[in-house]
Amino acid sequence: MIKDPRAPEPLNWNTFAQGLWKENPVFVMLLGLCPVLAVTNTAMNALAMGLATTFVLVCSGVLVSLLRKVIPKQVRIASYIIIIATFVTIADYAIQAISLDLYKALGAFIQLIVVNCIILGRAEAYASKNTVTHALVNALGMGAGFTFALLCLGVVREILGSGSLFGADLFGPAFQPWAVFVLPPGGFFVLAFWLFLFSVVRKRRQKTQIIEEEVRDAA
Amino acid sequence: MQPDSLSFIFLNAFIINNFVLAMFLGLCPFLGVSGKLKTAWNMGLAVIFVMLVSSVCSYLINLLLVRYNLEFLRLICYIAVIASAVQLVEMVMKKFSPTMFRSLGIFLPLITTNCAILGLALFQTNRSYNFTQCLAFSLGAGAGFTLALMLMAGLREKLELADVPDVALGAALSLMLAGMLSLAFMGFAGLGG
């Protein structure tokens, strides 16, 4: 899509919602898969990781957008990485201060938010070309989409793998947990299952669209 | 085997806790460059080299940072080191093998944002390995990454001829394969004791 960069698109629901569904970073663009698979063995970890990533995404988006006329084109990627690394360090120390258990459960993956391609991708593709409010809203949407995807995996893996949800027991002692779902292979399988489901939905939607068009043409 | 012996550290990073299949690090190139065996092999070599260089550099930088109580700058320094190491590999490869350079395409500069490399630097700091242990760890991790990439590429080359339902084509199928490989690699967990 080619747009005139001088005419800013109006700020609307779409700015926020495209990250949630149409351009969902995980299910559609397959970005940032490492944390998606690594920390989703419980729903709580998934939620914390999603919020931490959203924080970094929003802060770095706003700062990149503010500085978009100051940063020279040649060194922009390096500057973005430094900005992102700064906010990740803040998030890292904040989580350590809030809950040490959570910090231990997430391990090195908080610091690895730096190399999450979603954040650099948004900084390069959106925040560096749009106004601060646009960047803020868009980053919030992307963060929400990422958190949603993490929760999708985390909830399924925790229910099947340990028979609980957010730490609360669901099925009682008779339930035999499928341990494989909290282990690494389970992550791959659950994500593959979600992708499969989404592609079925998308295929079906395309088909109905084509049929509707044919009906309209015939009429 | 002693848990801090060199051979154990190597084996641990190589197969028991394989970076890709057990720790989910470096999945983007794992799914992106595993189409052909030849490209996968070149990518693996590039990653091993970047890992070695950045492991040595980050070990030295960490010594310096600890000495001056500047640990909070660790992340920023590591990223800068990795970015320069990737730049170095890019220049060397462009000079000596332009065809290989072209076949890797965008994935070469993207090694910078490969979490396996930053992960390696962070893990070796967390586990406070000494210099030789760092070397063994980075070699093992690089070899493990290459092994996983080659296995995946071999499987996908065969799979091109198979007849699969079209909704499962692409990423979903690759992830299913990765899951099965990961299951197989769990069998090595007993080696660690």
Image (cartoon, grey):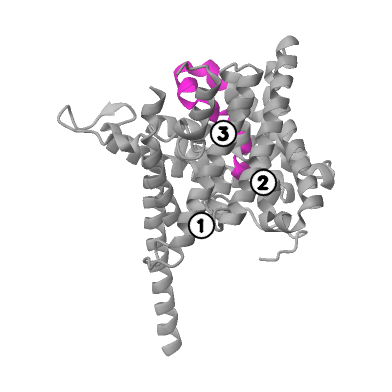
Q: Chain of mark 1?
A: A
Report the quarter where the N terminus of chain A lies. Answer: bottom right
Q: Work out whether disc 1 and disc 3 sit on a shared chain.
A: no
Crowd band around label 3 with a 10 angstrom C-alpha radius: few (<14), some (14–19), many (20+): many
Query: The residue under label 1 is which amino acid type?
Result: Lys
Query: The residue under label 2 is which amino acid type?
Result: Leu
Query: Spatial distance from mark 3 to mark 2, Cα to Cα?
Result: 18 Å
Task: Check residue A94 for magenta coloring.
Answer: yes
| Residue B162 location, quadrant | bottom left
Can you give x and y, in whole percent of width and height, for residue B21 in the image?
46, 40
Q: Nearer the viewer, mark 1 or mark 3?
A: 3
Residue B110, numbered label: 2
Query: The residue under label 3 is which amino acid type?
Result: Ala
Query: Spatial distance from mark 1 to mark 2, Cα to Cα?
Result: 25 Å
Residue A22, numbered label: 1
* Residue at the far bottom in the pictured view: A218
Q: Secondary structure at mark 1?
A: loop
Q: Nearer the viewer, residue A65 or B166?
A: B166
> Horizontally, is B104 left or right of B97 in the view?
left
Task: Check residue B108 for magenta coloring.
Answer: no
Residue B141, numbered label: 3
- In the rendered structure, which segment of residues is drawn in magenta? A93-122
Crowd band around label 2 with a 10 angstrom C-alpha radius: few (<14), some (14–19), many (20+): some
Residue A175, numbered label: none
| Residue B10 location, quadrant | top right
